[in-house]
Amino acid sequence: MKRVAVFASGSGSNFESIVQASKNDESYEVVLLFSDQPNAYALKRAETLGVEAESFSLKDYPDKLAYEADVLALLIRKRIDFIVLAGYMRLIGSTLLNHYSGQIVNIHPSLLPQFPGLNAIGQALEAGVTETGVTIHFVDEGMDTGPIIRQEKVWIEKDDTQETLQRKIQQVEHRLYPETLQQLLRKDEVIV
Ligand code: GAR
C-alpha cells in the first residue's frame, strides 16, 4: 500500500474525500496532511479524521530551498511514497521534484491548459465559455503544466455564479480525484 501525503493550503474538502475513499481501498493510505498555512481548515479536518498533520510557514525560513529541505526531511521521516496536491497554492521546487520525480500529482479546476493559476473558476466565468472542468495532472516545475492524467467537463449554465460553478466543480473533484488515485496507485502506472 502506497503511503500518501496530501498537501493543502485551504479548506481541504478534496483531502477529506481522498481520506474517506482510502478507507475502502487497498491501494493507498493517507498518512500525512501537510499545509503551508498554519490556520488552514484542512488541519482541523485532519484532526477530525485522525490523520497526522504538520504545517510549516515559509516566513520562518530564510528561503524556499531551506523550507523545502525541511519538508523533504519530514516526508522521508514519514516514509512517504507519493504526494497529492489538493488546493496547495504554492509551486513545488526542485528539492521535492527531484526526490519525488513522477510521484506528485495536482488537481486544478479547469480544463488545462485553459485557465491556469489562481481563480480558474472566475477566469472561466469572465471568459464567457460554456464549459470548463477538472484536470488531474503530474506536477512539473511550471504552474499547472505537467502531463495530464484525467480531465472531466463541467457545463456552465447562463445563471451560474462563482459559488454554483464551484459547487459543481467540487462535486466532480471529490469523485474524480480518489478514483484516479486508486487507479494510479494500484497499478503504479500512468492511466492516460
Ligand atoms: C480545488 O477546487 C482545487 O481544484 C483548487 O483549489 C480547490 C481546493 O479546494 N486548486 C487550484 O486552484 C490549484 N491551482 P479544497 O481545499 O476544498 O480541496
Image: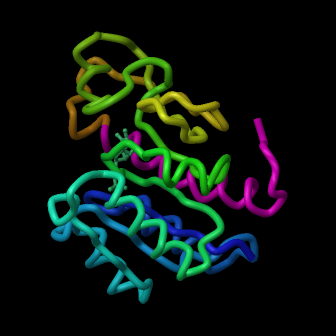
Q: Position of residue 114 (x, y in %)?
A: 44, 18
Q: Residue at x 70, y 61 (%)?
A: 182
Q: Main secondary structure of the magenta part?
A: helix
Q: Position of residue 82 (x, y in %)?
A: 62, 62
**Number of numbered labels in the structure image:** 0
> Which residue extends farthest bottom?
50
Q: Residue at x 32, y 29 (%)?
A: 120
Q: Residue at x 64, y 31 (%)?
A: 147
Q: Position of residue 99 (x, y in %)?
A: 60, 56
Near-viewer residue (31 or 155): 31
Is 66 on the left-hand or right-hand side of 26? left
Near-viewer residue (84 or 76): 76
Residue 140, located in which quarter of the rendered image? top right
Near-viewer residue (122 or 2): 2
Give above or below for 163 relative to 130.
Answer: below
Q: The C terminus lies in which quarter of the figure?
A: top right
Q: The N terminus lies in which quarter of the figure?
A: bottom right
On whether residue 86 falls in the magenta region, the answer is no
Near-viewer residue (181 or 169): 181
Is 2 on the left-hand or right-hand side of 105? right
Is 130 on the left-hand or right-hand side of 113? left
Q: Residue at x 38, y 69 (%)?
A: 70
Give above or below for 49 relative to 104.
Answer: below
Is 20 on the left-hand or right-hand side of 189? left
Per the rendered image, the range of residues in magenta is 166-192
Q: Position of residue 36 (x, y in %)?
A: 27, 61
Chosen colour scheme = rainbow
